[in-house]
């Protein structure tokens, strides 16, 4: 006969262990969603951290922890968790990437948001098969909005405009009016920069 530990390592043992693991995963997922829906963020944060003490590589616990930290405006902590999620088993590229980009943007880390967003666009453009292709189209405007908005915050209007123009044209664009307003502000900002640059050149020529 097998001892408890030896039994778990057998194929039969793993088969009987599977339902318990699935139930455990389902229980965590349902509980986390309920706490989030009821805005019980402090409780959800502790719930996730307790699970991560035993399962530090648990994807769902890290995912919900990052989300609840972001909802509590603990943005630097959220970014730290989001950074490690792509390396975890079960990570979902699209969902995790876009949450991460918004966390960077909301934290005011615009340079990092631009780099991460441009990298995400390269990956999105390389996706061509199955469900991920549909998700690419669904989330493409989000990446362009974050990248364009980050360039705008950095006052790099010339770089912001192409991203915001794409976001405006997408059929699945969200908050299109806000994007159009930001695009117009960037165009005005670019004209202002050009005018100021021309004025500075004129003054320099007069000094000569």
Image (spheres, rainbow, N blue to C red):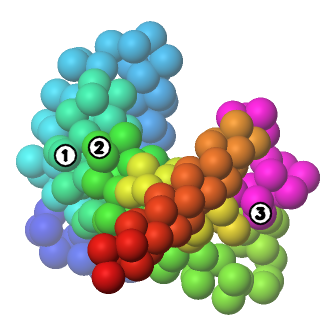
Mark identifier at residue 76: 1
- Closer to the eye: label 2 or 3: 3
Residue closer to the observer: 202 or 125: 202
Quarter assignment of residue 150: bottom left
**Tags 2 and 1 touching, CB below 8 Å:** yes
Which mark, by number, is residue 205? none
Residue 164: percent from left, percent from top? 69, 57
Which stretch is magenta? 164-178
Q: Residue at x 77, y 63 (%)?
A: 166
**Residue 40 at x, y = what percent?**
33, 13
Q: Are marks 2 and 3 in contact (CB under 8 Å)?
A: no
SS of the residue under disc 1: helix
Q: Give the position of the N terminus as an image quadrant.
A: bottom left
Identify the disc placed on residue 166: 3
Q: Nearer the viewer, residue 180 or 123?
A: 180
- Give the mark nearest the N terminus, 3 or 1: 1
Which residue: 31% across, 74% down? 207
Q: At 14% from the left edge and 37% from the top edge, which residue is drawn?
A: 50
Q: Quadrant of residue 18?
A: bottom left
**Res. 34 in view:** yes
Q: Is residue 187 left or right of residue 61?
A: right
């Amino acid at each position: 006969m097998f001892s408890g530990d030896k039994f778990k390592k057998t194929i039969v043992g793993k088969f009987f262990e599977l339902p318990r693991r699935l139930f455990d995963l389902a229980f965590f997922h349902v509980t986390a969603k309920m706490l989030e829906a009821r805005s019980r963020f402090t409780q959800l944060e502790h719930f996730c951290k307790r699970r991560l003490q035993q399962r530090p590589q648990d994807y769902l616990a890290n995912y919900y922890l990052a989300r609840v930290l972001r909802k509590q405006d603990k943005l630097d902590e959220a970014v730290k968790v989001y950074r490690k999620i792509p390396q975890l088993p079960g990570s979902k590229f699209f969902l995790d990437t876009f949450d991460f980009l918004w966390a960077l943007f909301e934290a005011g880390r615009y340079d990092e948001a631009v780099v991460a967003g441009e990298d995400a666009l390269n990956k999105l453009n390389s996706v061509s098969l199955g469900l991920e292709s549909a998700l690419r189209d669904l989330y493409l405007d989000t990446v362009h909005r974050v990248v364009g908005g980050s360039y705008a915050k950095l006052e790099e209007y010339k770089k912001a405009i192409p991203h915001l123009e794409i976001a405006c044209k997408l059929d699945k664009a969200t908050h299109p009016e806000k994007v159009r307003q930001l695009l117009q502000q960037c165009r005005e900002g670019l004209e202002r920069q050009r005018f100021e640059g021309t004025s500075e050149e004129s003054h320099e020529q007069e000094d000569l």
